[in-house]
Image (cartoon, rainbow, N blue to C red):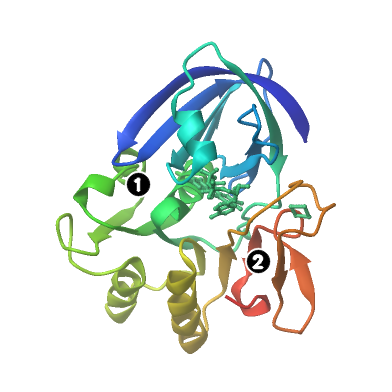
Amino acid sequence: MKDYKATIVSNEKIAENIYAITFDLGEQAEVRCGQFGNISVGGTHLLRRPIAICKADGTQVTFCYQIKGEGTQKLKTMGAGTSLNVLMPLGNGFFVEENEKKIALVGGGVGVFPLISVLRQYYGEKIISAYIGYRNKDAVCGVDEFTKATRFVGVTDDGSYGEKMNAVQAFEADLAKGNRPDVVLACGPTPMLRALKTVVEKENLPCYVSLEERMGCGIGACLVCVCDLTNGQHARVCKDGPVFNAKDVEV
Ligand SMILES: Cc1cc2nc3c(=O)[nH]c(=O)nc-3n(C[C@H](O)[C@H](O)[C@H](O)COP(=O)(O)OP(=O)(O)OC[C@H]3O[C@@H](n4cnc5c(N)ncnc54)[C@H](O)[C@@H]3O)c2cc1C
Ligand code: FES
């Protein structure tokens, strides 16, 4: 992990309210899929913004972010050549065991971006089915990446792209047809993760979820990001996660 003085290469809109920002780090970073960076947007914004690493290619890394509040609004205005501090790579990331040959990716909202990094890491090595839910057709992004999966099912809440259903329903529909993965990797809004947890428990499938929590330091020191574990204990999402075995965390 290093605090890079990273230079923006490009910062472009890729869907409604969603931007992709690529930085040059000046050197190559060792990144696992599912890890994230803590980006300083400068000025009076003392807290950095945690964003999943979507792609890491040589010295360049790409993050995709949804405009939410002040920090991401400010990020949107920054152009090529601007330098920002990016602390990365952070968190544990997703790990897939050697014997887990078939992976199901289940994602929604901004949770689709870390799943792109999984696809890029395991492309050609594993059989990957991606079940991705978007709000509507204007929010659809990452399709050029997800179509590289063995199977890609893109759905929307209003049926304006793909079928009208959510990512968990799309995954369940495929399960019912006998398309059963060895492991499920997921990231998305809490209600989505909760629904998925019910399905994987019923089906007795291993499942790992990437959680989103408000963060401070991003390196395990401030305890801002603590989540509840099913054994009554707590964990730091930034350092012990953000990826957890679904059976170990309360979602
Ligand atoms: C591990 C991790 C990975 C993430 N990956 C992505 C991603 O790939 N793309 C993406 O669009 N978003 C991602 N998020 C959410 C992203 O961090 C927030 O949307 C962003 O920080 C909002 O900042 P803001 O200043 O625009 O919003 P504001 O609401 O003004 O933020 C105020 C404060 O709350 C924090 N905050 C607000 N919402 C969240 C949130 N949902 N999660 C964590 N902190 C939050 C901000 O960091 C800031 O400190 C991720 C969050 C985590 C924890
Ligand atoms: S953000 Fe500080 S401990 Fe996780």
Query: Which percent across, then down, holds residue 83?
Result: 62, 17
Q: Nearer the viewer, residue 106 or 10?
A: 10
Residue 124, placed above or below residue 3: below
Number of numbered labels in the structure image: 2
| 231 sits to left or right of 67 | right
Name of the residue lying farthest toward the front: 44
Q: CA distance from mark 1 to mark 2?
A: 23 Å
Q: Is residue 148 visible?
A: yes
Name of the residue lying farthest toward the left: 160
Quadrant containing the N terminus in the rendered view: top right
Name of the residue lying farthest toward the bottom: 202
Query: Which percent across, then down, holds residue 106?
Result: 42, 63
Bin the neighbour count of mark 2 within 10 Å (Cα to Cα): few under 14, some 14-19, many 20 and up.
Answer: many
Bin the neighbour count of mark 1 within 10 Å (Cα to Cα): few under 14, some 14-19, many 20 and up.
Answer: many
The residue pinned by badge 1 equals 146
Quadrant assignment, res 53: top right
Q: Which of marks 2 and 1 precedes in the sequence? A: 1
| 149 sits to left or right of 194 | left
Residue 75, placed above or below residue 37: above
Q: Which mark is residue 244?
A: 2
Q: Is mark 1 within 8 Å of ligand 1?
A: no
The residue positioned 54% from the left and 18% from the top of the image is 8
Q: Nearer the viewer, residue 223 or 204?
A: 223
